[in-house]
Amino acid sequence: MEKLYEGKAKILYQTDDPDILLTYYKDDATAFNAQKRGQIVGKGEINCTVSTALFQWLESLGIPTHYIDRPSSREMRVKAIKIIPLEVVVRNIAAGSLCKQTGLKEGKVLPFPLVEFYLKDDALGDPLLTPDRIKVIDIASEEQVNQLRDLALQINQYLQEFFDKCQIILVDFKLEFGVDKTGKIYLGDEISPDTCRLWDKTQEDAQARILDKDRFRRDLGDVETAYQQVQARVLQQIESL
Ligand code: TMP
Ligand code: ASP
């Protein structure tokens, strides 16, 4: 298969069918725009499994996703959509760059889910956009941006409820979307401990409760165990549905 693109955590291949791509999930982990690099053993398989479960579940609730099927533990076949170069972040609780940039205290419950748009451009360091900046750089129409916001908020509601049943708090997460030839919008990329902040509801300690890539970003240790915990709880919740 022809390799179309190798990203930091996944490789994208063209399949024989022009409308279908294959995503291979790697164990490679990066942070701070790839200034920090490492491996999380088993991550590729876990992120592929968790993303598959969540995409299938969201799809059953009427959210269009790029997911087709999972031919092997680290491979996902997806619809060949054109990715809109925006990273859509939804935050329920203050953490990460929101705290750094605003001084909000980590753990503060936000008065409403905050939706943010970042430009997906590693060379520029994925800057935070404003509505007018989105218009000026013209990467998505106003109507598309409104659709992305509505979809992101709907997905947040579904995922918050889902993770709550897993005894996990959904702090924040990042989504990517794409369009097919007809302009229909699909949820793309992945939903995994790499792209979400997930806190264990059963743990009080501010570091012990972290079940996501912040363990790698902040050198907290036990990264693999945290990822395995998320996978186990997500699969258990899916099975109980
Ligand atoms: P941030 O607080 O660093 O802006 O991250 C917000 C959310 O987005 C968090 O759940 C992690 C996720 N994220 C990614 O998936 N990819 C990225 O490159 C970054 C910076 C954050
Ligand atoms: N994925 C991003 C990177 O390496 C950042 C992150 O997830 O923190 O660069």
Image: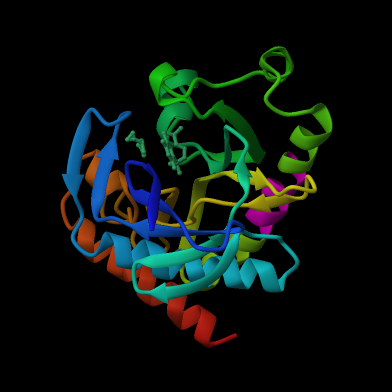
* Residue that lies at the very extreme toward the front in this rendered image: 16
- The coloring applied to the image is rainbow
32 magenta-colored: no
Residue situated in front as seen by the camera: 135 or 220: 135
* Residue that lies at the very extreme toward the bottom in this rendered image: 240
**Residue at image point 64% right, 60% down:** 65
Residue situated in front as seen by the camera: 103 or 90: 90
**Residue at image point 23% right, 45% down:** 216
Residue range highlighted in magenta = 149-157
* Residue that lies at the very extreme toward the right in this rendered image: 143
* Residue 48 appears in the picture as rendered: yes
Name the magenta segment's main secondary structure: helix
Q: Position of residue 135 (x, y in %)?
A: 74, 17
Q: Is residue 24 left or right of residue 146?
A: left
Q: Position of residue 85 (x, y in %)?
A: 57, 32
The quadrant in which the C terminus is found is bottom right
Residue 205 versus residue 37 in the image, above or below: below
Image region (quadrant) for ligand 1: top left
Residue situated in front as seen by the camera: 170 or 151: 151
**Residue at image point 72% right, 54% down:** 154
